[in-house]
Amino acid sequence: MSQNPPELRPDLSRARITETRRDGQPTIGMVSLGCPKALVDSERILTRLRAEGYGISADYSGADAVIVNTCGFLDSAKAESLEAIGEALAENGRVIVTGCLGAEPEYITGAHPRVLAVTGPHQYEQVLDAVHTAVPPAPDPFIDLMPASGVKLTPRHYSYLKISEGCNHHCKFCIIPAMRGRLASRPAHAVIREAGKLIESGVKELLVISQDTSAYGTDIRHAEERGHRAHITDLARDLGQLGAPGEIWIRLHYIYPYPHVRELIPLMADGLILPYLDIPFQHAHPDTLKRMARPAAAERTLDRIAEWRGICPDITLRSTFIVGYPGETEEEFQTLLDWLDEAQLDRVGCFQYENVDGARSNALPDHVAPEVKQERWDRFMEKAQAISEAKLAQKVGQVMDVIVDDIDADGIATCRTKSDAPEIDGNLFIDEGTEALSVGEIVSVEVDEAGEYDLWGRLAPKR
């Protein structure tokens, strides 16, 4: 699958941060790992540091200290985080660790005893205290200016918008509630205010994220303040009204399939928000879902999918699944394949089950052998790829709006349709006539070729 250019990856795009440093200004580097929610944490930390007069370095050598924002969800992610910490220590020597893996400080210091400090997820004040200790601030109020939107680690034309922290679910394979706590929703007016500032700064696409987006506001009883109600339907409607129709894209991620999700679909049909739902179904067999402590109603989910498509035929459904979960039989896995055939999801990701320290699933019986997990993953992805290829082939000849992510030296434009989120979905490529295009522009394209995950097209005549 083709991906966006490496410089657009969130964990590498720190090179896009302004380098307007003055003489004597203390500077901090940032390595941001993990999911978009962690990326938002990194942006908040850097914004606070910039407001205090720190410069932001795009490389190790130019930094007085480096913050590594870690991921600790899977053993493979923990290993990547330890590797990143080691690299920062080798290249810079002064390292502060934060993020999800920071919830296990002994694990980090056992491998890297030279780190200056370890803080847990979204512990912004503790991170700032550690930076102050390692590199005292030296602000100049006449020079150190901050943009209203703060420091962003994504390209200028899109931004993640975090609406809540934590999660109230108790899925056996997941330790996010233990690391990040229970659901804590932001006031709706604060989310709208941040979104407005981002749009004023040039953002064209807002990617709404949290651990459980469709549960937004339930912890604060859908409180209404300053004209905005903390309910995902109301929030989506309010966000969609921030710009003219089609001018600002609002994309929803991590939507748990509650019944009230149906209320979002008419907003998609009316063009207020993108016709795109990212829903982590995880599996389809009721026994597997019960062992996961997930809702065991895959049949009802199929009915809901049919209902959503009836309201908004253009809706794109993305989901993630786990194969090889403890106790998964061949029959259960075949049920998942059959369900996928019926659901015909547009975008699909799949993970092989891994034990996670602290997860209850570790203690389940009948763990699946690695070679069986691999074989099932191969079969799952083969089916998902065939579905994707057939769905994309149906788009040939259609005219659709795309957002331009990048234009390379050869004039090839990498774009995304409304069906494609950055970094996780496919791209649409335009390889001629791009001289007048700009990154972040939304243009109409006629699709003339389709692959397994990507599309190719040419600019359509202006309407």
Image (spheres, helix red, strand yellow):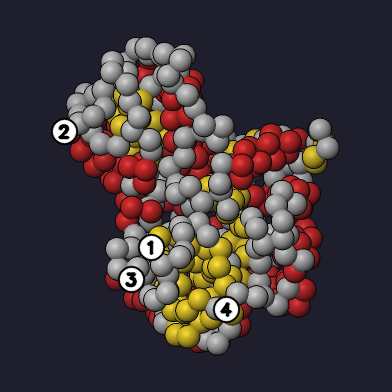
Q: Nearer the viewer, residue 353 or 307?
A: 307
- The quadrant of the rendering that contains the N terminus is bottom left
Query: What x and y, as percent, mark residue 253?
Result: 59, 55
Q: Between marks 2 and 1, how big is the CA–CA gap?
A: 34 Å
Residue at numbered disc 4: 461
Q: Is residue 7 above or below residue 93?
A: below
Foreground tag (4 vs 3): 4
The disc labelled 3 sits on which kind of residue?
Gln
Q: Which mark is residue 90?
A: 2
The disc labelled 4 sits on which kind of residue?
Pro
Name the residue rendered at 50%, 70% in the picture: 348
Query: What x and y, as percent, mark residue 239?
Result: 71, 49
Residue at numbered disc 1: 407
Name the residue rendered at 45%, 49% in the picture: 155
State which tag comes first along the sequence, 1 or 4: 1
Q: Is residue 334 above or below residue 113?
A: below
State which tag comes first along the sequence, 3 or 1: 3
Q: Between marks 1 and 4, how big is the CA–CA gap?
A: 20 Å
Name the residue rendered at 36%, 70% in the picture: 412
The disc labelled 2 sits on which kind of residue?
Ala
State which tag comes first along the sequence, 2 or 3: 2
Query: What x and y, as percent, mark residue 403?
Result: 52, 63
Residue at numbered disc 3: 374
Q: Between marks 4 and 3, how big is the CA–CA gap?
A: 47 Å
Secondary structure under badge 2? helix
Foreground tag (1 vs 4): 4
